[in-house]
C-alpha cells in the first residue's frame, strides 16, 4: 500500500492549502494511497478537505516567519526563533530521520520544511518539494551582515533543501536555486462554486450593497475600525472574528456554514494581503482584490504581477488601511473591467500528481 510522508509548514494555512489538492489528486489516481501528515497545522483544517486516508503526526517542522499581526513581520524574533531551532540541529535531524524510517514511506513530500528534506535523504527515501517559495528565499534579504550566525543558518537551510530529489515549482513561484532539480507546474487552486444569493440571505444583505470579505490569512487583526466600516454607504463587510453587537453592516464568518472557498467566490471584493492561495483563487473566479502590501516578503512582487495580469486588483496603502480610508479603493475595484488575458488553468495538482506517481508503487 503506497504511503506518503507529507511535511507541511504551519506558518499559516497556505502551505497546507497547496499540498492537500495534490494528495487528493494522487488518491484519485492511486486508490490505495495513505498519507502521514507531519505538521502542526491543526486537525480541523484537514478534516473537511482530505479525501484520502490520513494520519496526523504533529511536529514542528520549521519556523517560517514570526509576525506582529498580519502585516508586520518581526524579523528579529524570526531570526532568534531560527537560532533556537538550529541550536540542536543534529539531534533534531536524527530524531526526524528515525521518525521517517519508522514510518516507512515510499516518498517524502514537503511544503516547505527543509528539515523533512534532510531527514528523508538521510533515511534513504525520495524527497520532493512542492511549493511557490522556500524559507531561504524569504530570509535572504533580511540577513544582518553583522550577525554571521544568520548567514550560517541560511547556508544550513540551503544545504538541507539541496538534498531534495526534486522541486515542483508552482506558478507563480520564486526561483529557489537551492534545489538541484526543478520542474515548473501550473497554479494550485480549488475554487468552489459561488453561493451568493444564499449567503446574502443569511446575512440579510440587499442586492444593491457590495459585500467585502476582509481576510488577511490565518492571523487576525487585534482591532478593526468597526465604526468607520459601519459608516460606508452601500458597503457591508465579512470578517474572521467576533463583531460588536451594535454593528449591522459588519458580519462574522462564524455565522456562515459555507466553506471559505465558496465565500471567496461569492463576495464582491476581497480585502487582503498578497498571499498565494487567496490571490490565485480570486483570479480564477474573477473576484476583485483590494490588497495591502508588506513590501518585505519575497513572493509579493510575483503575486501582484500575476493579479494585475490575469485578475483585477487595486492597491491600498498601509496608511490608508490603518486609517480606514477604504472606500475609494473598494469602489475602484468594483468598477474595474474584466482582464484582457484569461488566467492559466489551475493544473498544478494534476501536474504534480502525474510526476509523483512515478515514485510510488
Image (tube, rainbow, N blue to C red):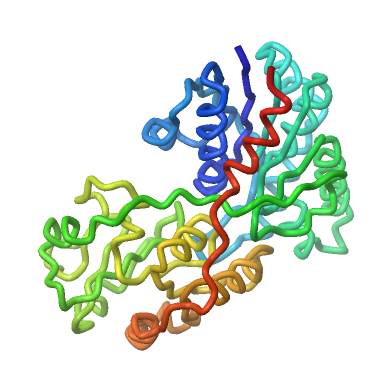
Percent of width and height locating residue 256: 21, 50
Horizontal side, residue 177 vs residue 329: left or right: right
Count of numbered circles on the image: 0
Q: Quadrant of residue 228?
A: bottom left
Q: Quadrant of residue 297?
A: bottom right
Seen at 62% across and 30% down, the residue is 6
Percent of width and height locating residue 234: 19, 81
- Viewer-proximal residue among 155 and 18: 18
Seen at 71% across and 40% down, the residue is 129
In the displayed structure, 271 sits above or below 42; it is below
In the displayed structure, 140 sits above or below 182; it is below
Percent of width and height locating residue 13: 50, 46
Horizontal side, residue 88 vs residue 34: left or right: right
Q: Quadrant of the C terminus?
A: top right
Q: Quadrant of the N terminus?
A: top right
Answer whether residue 89 is visible to the viewer in this image. Answer: yes
Seen at 49% across and 72% down, the residue is 311
- Viewer-proximal residue among 248 and 72: 248
Seen at 77% across and 65% down, the residue is 141
- Viewer-proximal residue among 293 and 91: 293
Answer whether residue 324 is visible to the viewer in this image. Answer: no
Percent of width and height locating residue 265: 34, 60
Amino acid at each position: 500500500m503506497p504511503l506518503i510522508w507529507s511535511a507541511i509548514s504551519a506558518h499559516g494555512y497556505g502551505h497546507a492549502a497547496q499540498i492537500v489538492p495534490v494528495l487528493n489528486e494522487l488518491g484519485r489516481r492511486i486508490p490505495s494511497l495513505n498519507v502521514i501528515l507531519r505538521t502542526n497545522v491543526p486537525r480541523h483544517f484537514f478534516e473537511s478537505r482530505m479525501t484520502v486516508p490520513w494520519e496526523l503526526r504533529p511536529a514542528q517542522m520549521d519556523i517560517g516567519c514570526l509576525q506582529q499581526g498580519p502585516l508586520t513581520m518581526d524579523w528579529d524574533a524570526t531570526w532568534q526563533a531560527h537560532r533556537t531551532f538550529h541550536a540542536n540541529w543534529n539531534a533534531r535531524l536524527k530524531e526526524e530521520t528515525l521518525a521517517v524510517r519508522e514510518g516507512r514511506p515510499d516518498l517524502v513530500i514537503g511544503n516547505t520544511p527543509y528539515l523533512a528534506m534532510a531527514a528523508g535523504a538521510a533515511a534513504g527515501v525520495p524527497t520532493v518539494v512542492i511549493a511557490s517559495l522556500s524559507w531561504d528565499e524569504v530570509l535572504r534579504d533580511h540577513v544582518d551582515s553583522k550577525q554571521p550566525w544568520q548567514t550560517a543558518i541560511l547556508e544550513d537551510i540551503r544545504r538541507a533543501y539541496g538534498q531534495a530529489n526534486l522541486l515542483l515549482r508552482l506558478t507563480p513561484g520564486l526561483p529557489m536555486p537551492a534545489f538541484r532539480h526543478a520542474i515548473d507546474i501550473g497554479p494550485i487552486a480549488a475554487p468552489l462554486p459561488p453561493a451568493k444569493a444564499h449567503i446574502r440571505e443569511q446575512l440579510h444583505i440587499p442586492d444593491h450593497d457590495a459585500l467585502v470579505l476582509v481576510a488577511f490569512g490565518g492571523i487576525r487583526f487585534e482591532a478593526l475600525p468597526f465604526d468607520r466600516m459601519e459608516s460606508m454607504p452601500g458597503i457591508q463587510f465579512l470578517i474572521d472574528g467576533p463583531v460588536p453587537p451594535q454593528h449591522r453592516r459588519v458580519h462574522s464568518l462564524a455565522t456562515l456554514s459555507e466553506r471559505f472557498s465558496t465565500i471567496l467566490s461569492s463576495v464582491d471584493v476581497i480585502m487582503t494581503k498578497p498571499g498565494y492561495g487567496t490571490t490565485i483563487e480570486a483570479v480564477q473566479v474573477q473576484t476583485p482584490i483590494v490588497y495591502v502590501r508588506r513590501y518585505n516578503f519575497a513572493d509579493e512582487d510575483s503575486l501582484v504581477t500575476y493579479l494585475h495580469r490575469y485578475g483585477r486588483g487595486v492597491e491600498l496603502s498601509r496608511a490608508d488601511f490603518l486609517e480606514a480610508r477604504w472606500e475609494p479603493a473598494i469602489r475602484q475595484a468594483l468598477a474595474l473591467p474584466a482582464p484582457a488575458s484569461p488566467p492559466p488553468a489551475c493544473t498544478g495538482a494534476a501536474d504534480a500528481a502525474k510526476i509523483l506517481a512515478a515514485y510510488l508503487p
